[in-house]
Image (cartoon, rainbow, N blue to C red):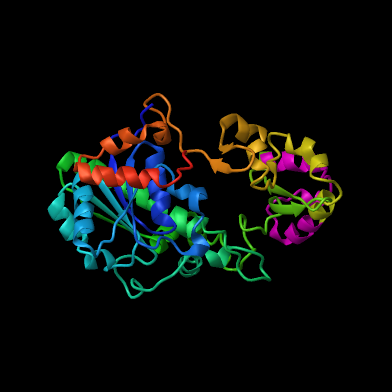
Amino acid sequence: MSGVLDGVRVVEFDAIGPAPFCAMMLAHHGASVVRIARPGGQPDMLDAGEHDLLLRNRLNIALDLKAPADLAHAHALIRAADILIEGYRPGVMERFGLGPDACFADNPRLVYGRVTGYGQSGPLAQQPGHDINFLALSGALHAMGEPDRPPAPPLNLVADFAGGSLMLAFGVVAAHLQAVRTGRGQVVDAAMIDGTAVLMALVCGWRNAGMWSAGRGDNLIDGAAPFYRCYATRDHRFLAAGAIEPRFYAAFRRALGLTDPLFDEQMDRARWPAMREQIAAVIAGRTLAEWQPAIDDPEACLSPVLSIEETPFHPHLAARRVFEHDGAAVTPSAAPRFFGGTGVSSPSARSLSERVAAWPVSEDLRARLLAGAEGRADPGV
């Protein structure tokens, strides 16, 4: 089965986090991705080796971009590519002789995707950082966590992957569509701090309307609302509640047996502390398993907080095969899904020779691609 990006060729320059996640997304949906690795690879603390799921479904080649022969191989791949992805600080690719101007000279229709923390311009453009730093400056981190504790970082899901990888993926695919029409590529500047700020659009709108407090843990969706937060069960597990609309709030009350008139005025914020306290006591009276009948109420909006080990076996996730598991490894499946067209491809199901043949390059370079692919275990889709 071919994917929606079948026939699209992508060159990815070795980086951590956002760039490989974007390339993984493109590869999931049919793009042929060649990853150019630097000598030395990733830092040991970040290198998961054959278990690095972000690097699945690639052709891999190690190139020393300071060596003329290897630099020539990089240019050859770029001439054959539709999209280039790089995640270095501004100026690094230019120092290798692989900046946008040089690459457009090789390939005018190339889409040149750049993902950085602070973007290609501005006072912080050259400053290093990580997800937590971009969250901090964007205003997102300030809104996360308990009111009397430091802000809680949401793993690296928000700035790195949502604000960086997915914005880059959207940008390069959109620019590729234009390049197909016009024959001209362009640079996509995906800054994680920009993307994270865009993700705050709903909260900013509420703030502008006077509906959002600057205080952490004082708002509808940040844990203040008694019907939108997590509670501990008797066996030290957690139950997540998300019953915002009146209809679902009514079902939530029924499921938990909340008959006290205290709960009659759902949006009376003065009542929220007492409501939270009483709900916490109720939920703490049973184990997570004993709360299953309440969870099964389709309108109560109650969910168990599952671990990575548990989630592949949840009936809904199992039915949709959201995760693949072999008894040891847990692997997220491709998303989103497509129906009525070509569907989702399985690049790992293609033979190695087919994957290499997709690149119109010299036999010498194809041999290097083949050797790089054979030298690395690929966890597949």
Can you name the residue that lies furthest to the right here?
A: 285
The residue under the point 77% across, 43% down is: 253
Q: Quadrant of the N terminus?
A: top left
Residue 81 shows up from this direction:
no
Residue 42 shows up from this direction:
yes
The residue under the point 35% across, 61% down is: 39
Specify whether 172 is left or right of 278.
left
267 or 142: nearer the eye?
A: 142
Specify whether 273 is left or right of 74.
right
The residue under the point 18% across, 48% down is: 79
The residue under the point 37% across, 67% down is: 118
In percent of width and height, residue 218 lies at 64, 63
176 or 374: nearer the eye?
A: 374
Residue 326 lies, with reference to residue 87, above or below; the image says above
Magenta stretch: dominant SS? Answer: helix
Can you name the residue that lies furthest to the bottom here?
A: 123
359 or 172: nearer the eye?
A: 359
103 or 249: nearer the eye?
A: 103
- The image quadrant of residue 128 is bottom left
In magenta stretch: residue 276: yes
Can you name the residue that lies furthest to the left here?
A: 105
The region drawn magenta spans 248-277
In percent of width and height, residue 50 lies at 49, 49
In percent of width and height, residue 219 lies at 62, 60
In magenta stretch: residue 168: no
